[in-house]
Amino acid sequence: MDNIDIATNNVKSYNYSEIKEKNLEILELSEKKSELKVEGEIKGFLREEERIKAVAICFSDIEGRFHMLDYDKNFFLKSADNLTFDGSSVRGFSELKESDLRLIPDWGSTRVAPEDIFGIGKVIMFADVYGNDNKPYHADFRAQLKEYAKKLEKTKGLMPMAAAEVEGFLMDGQDAEQNYTKSRNFKLISSGGYYHSLPLDSLKQFIDKAATVQRVMAFNNEKDHPEVAPSQFEMNFSYTDVVRACDNISLYKLICRQVAENMGMTATFLPKPKKGINGSGMHLNISFSKGGKNIFYDKKGKDGLSKFAWDATSKILNHASELCLIFNSSVNSYRRLDPNFEAPNQIEVSAKDRGSMIRIPAGNEKTARFEVRSVAPDANSYLAIFSIIKTIIEGEKEEKIENKRERVKFLSSNIHDAIRQFRRGELTDKILGEEAKESYLNLKEEVADRSPKELGRYIKKDEILFHHEVTNQVLWDKF
């Protein structure tokens, strides 16, 4: 991408090399300096850099749907401490009578944005949502996760770390999800499978382009490839702190969608858009460090994990049923929990069985972790990881009775059962708080009520059109 002049406003473009260099510089800055110093340096950069004209501020609602609004750079710099927005227009946020919410920029999350994905002359920055009481808003789980992670580090010296393996599908045609009523089906762009795709076919070109954008945005990519199902993809990026890991997930999905749109296709993160093939997951790899050491590792421990790690898995398994609605937040996600397609629906932990909801990958003192496989790619990653971390710290371990044969337990097979388990769960009261839990429940019940109670054998249009990442006011009002 060469530097170009735009006649209308004389903005000059960044090339990809410049973007990558600057983003890696900002990443290093955010890891080594205090928040106040980071803020000062980012403000200085924005003031001095003439090629930047706007700041794209982004946040997620309670369901995990991505929201983004652009501020003129000069206005943003003058008004960064008073960025208000109408929360009543965001599903699951404030009521009309108390609509004003505040955006608090997270300066260390700043990244220079490639123009072919975000538009010319922009940086993108995440923000935390605060209420009128000047505290993190109860329904913004990025803010909640950030506060909880700080608390753990300050009081216990613990730092939760995460990485995600997010799968998706590439479909033919733009807006394939919104047009599902017309076609009744999705058309796969490729018939290839695991690691099997021609070097220059549409799927591989899409993966290459999306992965390139992620590299220049300082994701620290590890590998990318077609997945098991035809037209399915996965791109992996490195371990990092839990908030940045979730930011990467949000940007990853956005980048994939925009790259696909640019190519005349649709990237979808519906968990099971096609029957008869594997669905998509968002496997969350979790560990804790203390004093720079991975405390999940124990060379002499079972499967190389420490007692702390095994206690953590026990707590997640014990509360799995009530957490299921957080991990699988849509009607469609319960199609993925199908045992015929490597479904991680067993409330078990295993180093080998991929049907278990928690898997123990082979690891060493740096990489020891566990992988929560039952999370769908349309889940709110901030809420999902916040729930996992809080369960590890505050949950109760499974009680095992000696000499009693244990039967295999399974996660809910439909959203209605998951809603019931979530509603009566005591830990979810503690994780979300009363107000956020009630709001989340209402949203899940609304979408469940708009879809047939039985999943049946074929994918229904209602579970697609009323999906939280697909629907809009026009589609919702057609019910």
Image: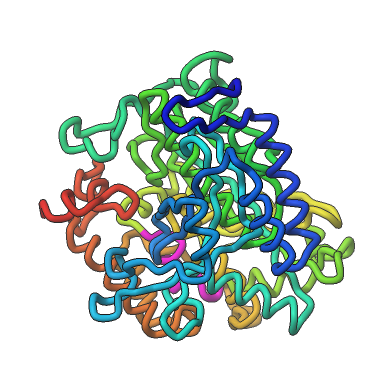
Residue at position x 44%, y 83% in the image:
433
Residue at position x 84%, y 53% in the image:
364
Figure disc tally = 0
- Residue 39 falls in which quadrant of the image? bottom right
In the image, residue 255 above or below residue 317: above
**Colour scheme in the image?**
rainbow
- Residue 349 falls in which quadrant of the image? bottom right
Q: Nearer the viewer, residue 378 or 137?
A: 137
* Range shown magenta: 318-329
Majority secondary structure of the magenta segment?
helix
Quarter of the picture holding the N terminus: top right
Q: Is residue 41 left or right of residue 388?
A: right
168 is within the stretch colored magenta: no
Residue at position x 31%, y 64% in the image:
90
Q: Position of residue 79 (x, y in %)?
A: 49, 65
Toward the left, the furthest residue is: 478
Quarter of the picture holding the C terminus: bottom left
In the image, residue 338 above or below residue 358: above
User: Does residue 432 appear in this view?
Assistant: yes
322 is within the stretch colored magenta: yes
Q: Nearer the viewer, residue 239 or 13?
A: 13
Q: Position of residue 299 (x, y in %)?
A: 88, 61
Q: Is residue 413 left or right of residue 242?
A: left
Q: Nearer the viewer, residue 59 or 79?
A: 79
Q: Nearer the viewer, residue 340 or 254?
A: 254
In the image, residue 393 above or below residue 116: below
